Image (cartoon, helix red, strand yellow):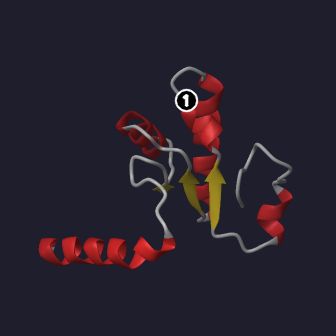
């Protein structure tokens, strides 16, 4: 379920469809330092995901502070410029290969 809380999504969809991920819109992440309601929503969605066994992805992570704050509030996945800027599909193989090489070096 994408853009949870900002579009026309409904909690009833969580029971009707086999979702495996809830995405938290970047608008909540970008203002989490200034607006207590944003962190409350992130915490609530993270808790909902944990209770239902559904991954929660926070969009728009650009700083380490944002990363740490959403992790503490229960988000299990993130996406945003802190991890990587958008890349062309043609670069995906190289990106995956580089990550696999890092993992092999650590093991």
- Residue 16, horizontal then vertical, whole percent: 84, 70
Q: Is residue 32 above or below residue 105?
A: above
- Residue 78, horizontal then vertical, whole percent: 48, 53
Circle 1 — which element? loop
54 on left or right of 83: right
> Mark 1 — residue?
32
Q: Is residue 12 above or below residue 107?
A: above
- Residue 4, horizontal then vertical, whole percent: 72, 50
103 on left or right of 16: left
Rendered residue at 28%/71% (across/down): 99
Rendered residue at 55%/29% (across/down): 32
2 on left or right of 80: right
Q: Residue furthest top?
A: 34
Rendered residue at 49%/67% (across/down): 88
* Disc 1 crowd, CA 10 A, few/some/many (<14, 14-19, 20+): some
Of 100 and 91, nearer the camera is 91
Of 94 and 32, nearer the camera is 94
Q: Quadrant of the N terminus?
A: bottom right
Q: Quadrant of residue 2?
A: bottom right
Of 31 and 84, nearer the camera is 84
Q: Quadrant of residue 62?
A: top left
21 on left or right of 62: right
Q: Quadrant of the C terminus?
A: bottom left
Rendered residue at 40%/37% (across/down): 63
């Amino acid at each position: 379920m994408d853009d949870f809380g900002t579009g026309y999504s409904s909690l009833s969809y969580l029971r009707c469809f086999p979702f495996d991920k809830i995405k938290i819109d970047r608008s909540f992440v970008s203002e989490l330092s200034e607006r207590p309601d944003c962190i409350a929503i992130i915490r609530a969605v993270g808790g909902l995901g944990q209770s239902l066994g559904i991954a929660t992805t926070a969009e728009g992570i650009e700083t380490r502070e944002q990363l740490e704050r959403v992790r503490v509030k229960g988000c299990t996945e993130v996406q945003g410029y802190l991890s990587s800027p958008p890349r062309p599909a043609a670069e995906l193989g190289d990106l995956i290969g580089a990550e696999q090489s890092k993992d092999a070096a650590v093991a």
